[in-house]
Image (tube, helix red, strand yellow):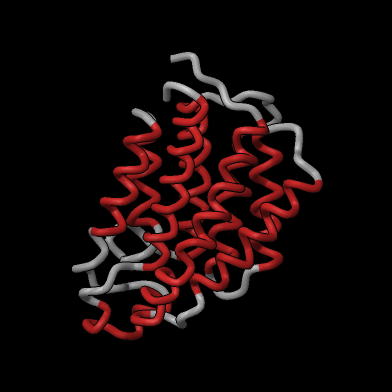
């Protein structure tokens, strides 16, 4: 398809993600209150606001640099597990992109796969453990097809966490009581891919 995305595209995506997280913070907190510490929405809200502020002041020159800067900002500003996990996702994805000034969708999918593997290693989780990976793994695989497919796969992955019993993270302490609740991390991951698809759609065919 020949599409290529510059640093500005990734800045716009993360700005849109910050707005979406701000908009949906209440939902994320509600989901987290059922099976977690009830701080997922507030933590991500604070973290992505800090990312948007940083990128507005000093927009990096390459896609990789944008994601690395965003990841570092999340790690430094977000408490709990979500900061290190999302920070690792973006930072490792950015490092995998290297210093190229333009990045195609398939190259982005390959870099995201590196980032997702790092998240899995950091948290010790796999698909089916009722975590953000249940949305991230199918989304990254589907990103090889299209941005829209990635969005759909992430949303379906998040919904698929409802009947699962949590095996990792704070929710795992609840055992069977975690069944019947949608995982907040998978939900926020789906939110990010929805905004990625929306940003790509605004740029043209994707």
Q: Residue at x 68, y 41 (%)?
A: 66
Left or right for 75, reference 24: right
Q: Which of 186 and 112 is in front in this view?
A: 186
Q: In which quarter of the image is residue 189?
A: bottom left
Q: Nearer the viewer, residue 18 or 110?
A: 18
Give the farthest residue toward the right.
58
Give the farthest residue toward the top.
2
Point out residue 52 in the picture as x, y percentages from the top left corner.
67, 52
Q: Residue at x 27, y 83 (%)?
A: 175
Q: Residue at x 37, y 29 (%)?
A: 146
**Quarter the N terminus occupies:** top left
Point out residue 171 in the picture as x, y percentages from the top left corner.
36, 78
Point out residue 204 in the picture as x, y percentages from the top left corner.
47, 23
> Is 202 drawn above or below residue 188 in the view shown?
above
Left or right for 86, reference 27: right
**Quarter the C terminus occupies:** top left
Point out residue 69 in the picture as x, y percentages from the top left corner.
71, 49
Number of numbered markers = 0
Q: Which residue is drawn at 34% across and 79% down?
A: 172
Q: Quadrant of residue 183?
A: bottom left
Q: In which quarter of the image is residue 103?
A: top right
């Amino acid at each position: 398809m020949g599409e290529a995305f510059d640093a500005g595209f990734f800045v716009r995506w993360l700005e849109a993600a910050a707005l979406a997280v701000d908009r949906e913070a209440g939902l994320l907190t509600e989901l987290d209150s059922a099976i977690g510490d009830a701080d997922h929405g507030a933590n991500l809200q604070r973290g992505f606001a800090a990312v948007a502020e940083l990128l507005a002041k000093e927009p990096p020159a390459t896609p990789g640099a944008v994601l690395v800067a965003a990841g570092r900002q999340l790690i430094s500003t977000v408490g709990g597990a979500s900061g290190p996990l999302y920070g690792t996702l973006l930072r490792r994805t950015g490092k995998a992109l290297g210093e190229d000034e333009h990045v195609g969708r398939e190259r982005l999918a390959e870099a995201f796969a590196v980032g997702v593997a790092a998240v899995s290693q950091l948290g010790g989780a796999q698909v089916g453990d009722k975590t953000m990976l249940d949305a991230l793994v199918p989304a990254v695989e589907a990103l090889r097809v299209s941005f829209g497919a990635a969005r759909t796969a992430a949303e379906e992955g998040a919904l698929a966490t409802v009947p699962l019993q949590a095996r990792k993270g704070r929710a795992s302490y609840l055992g069977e009581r975690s069944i019947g609740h949608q995982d907040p991390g998978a939900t926020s991951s789906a939110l990010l891919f929805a905004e990625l698809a929306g940003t790509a759609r605004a740029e043209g065919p994707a």
